[in-house]
Amino acid sequence: MKDTALRIAGFKDSIFGVISKLAREHNAVNLGQGFPDFDGPDWLKDIVYKKMQEGHNQYAPFHGTANLRQEIANYYKSFYHLNYHPESEVTVTVGATEAIYLVITALINPGDEVVVLEPFYDSYVASIKMAGGIPIPVTMHAPDFLIDQKELDAAISPRTKLIILNNPHNPSGKVWLKQEIEMVAKAAEKSDAYLLSDEVYEFLVFDGCKHIPTATLEGMKERTITISSAGKTFGVTGWKIGWICANETVSKACRLVHQYVTFSVSTPMQEGVAESLKKLPEYLPGFVSLYKEKRDFFYKEMRQLGFDFSSPKGTYFMMVPISGKTKLNDVDYALKLIKENKVATVPPSAFYLKSTEGERYLRFCFAKKEVTLKNAVKNLQGL
Ligand code: PMP
Ligand code: GLN
């Protein structure tokens, strides 16, 4: 048989799949892959069921149902004062993962450079490679996950076509300050590059922090492509409804790819998300306080177990330093914890191309039931 395509050469099973499989095999408490182990609210599910019963069951318009695009445009306007035209600037995708793939495929030619801030969500680099682009990593240095102006400048070149920023940030839980986003925005302007802003955790911010969408920075709306996902906002990762907000030219290009990748996205789910987005103002305070409670509980327990780090300001992840506990690297320590302590975490070195800083950390997901978090803590006693 002839070989499979070069564009996937070197691809392996994703770290999330590998860890979840190991967790099952070893009967470990799974704080690895980022998903809540509890269900979304009943009212949310009722809405989708109603949409199915009302007959929203055939193909949706390929760029998204009119209702959903309108509601997405509405919340960007009411929360952030950002105006996106629902017909020409909002596109619905199968989760943020498809959105990332579409943006990169629509913009990147072979040989184009894409600056990625590491640690990164793994699909960025995979999509860049499939497009024949060249990922150029810039490290967000631990423990505060700050980027260095000199390193950013050195990464930018006339070949830079796109920079990818994730805020709030998976895996560190960092919520970017305005001046930090500005640093990246200026780099994009300097190299006349697009800026892909992955904001899937936009509503998961704690302690009075404010999420600042990149597109709200002065002069950045045209250049910025913003993506988000209902999976995070409503705690239903399996729903896989995401979106892209971008200028008309970029939206058109993304839609050209989308029509041949998925063509259109599940109709009743879109209609359900449209209805649910209307309820954001009532829904969000309870949502944020639920996750804050989990963060506070798990952070306190991890401190008591002797892990020394600051509490994350956003997302549902914690990057926990392991140097004080072991001489093993992240992968070996993660394997040891799964096998011996029955707790699964993600070794973050999978999210880096350049730096080895990830080897000194493990990523814990705290979007879990109280009993799951308590069991994990119990299993980690004595470390
Ligand atoms: N971006 C980031 C930073 C993520 O953590 C994830 C995964 N949860 C995604 C994108 C993908 O989101 P979705 O599940 O909507 O495809
Ligand atoms: N985004 C989730 C995480 O970071 C996982 C998504 C996936 O499994 N691809 O854990």
Image: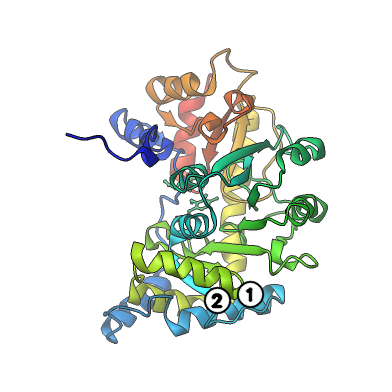
**Residue at point 57% right, 32% down?**
353
Q: Is residue 279 among what the camera can see?
A: no
Q: The disc labelled 1 sits on which kind of residue?
A: Tyr
Dots 1, 2 in contact, CB < 8 A? yes
Q: Nearer the viewer, residue 277 or 359?
A: 359
Asked where in the image residue 50 lies, by quadrant, the reply is bottom left
Q: The disc labelled 2 sits on which kind of residue?
A: Ile
Circle on res. 72: 2
Vertical order, 212 against 60 (above or below): above
Mark 2 crowdedness (10 Å alpha carbons): few <14, some 14-19, many ≥20: many
Vertical order, 317 against 301 (above or below): below
Circle on res. 76: 1
**Residue at point 40% right, 27% down?**
342
Q: Nearer the viewer, residue 363 or 352?
A: 352
Mark 1 crowdedness (10 Å alpha carbons): few <14, some 14-19, many ≥20: some
- Cα distance, mark 1 to mark 2? 6 Å
Give the image location of residue 338, x and y in percent: 41, 26
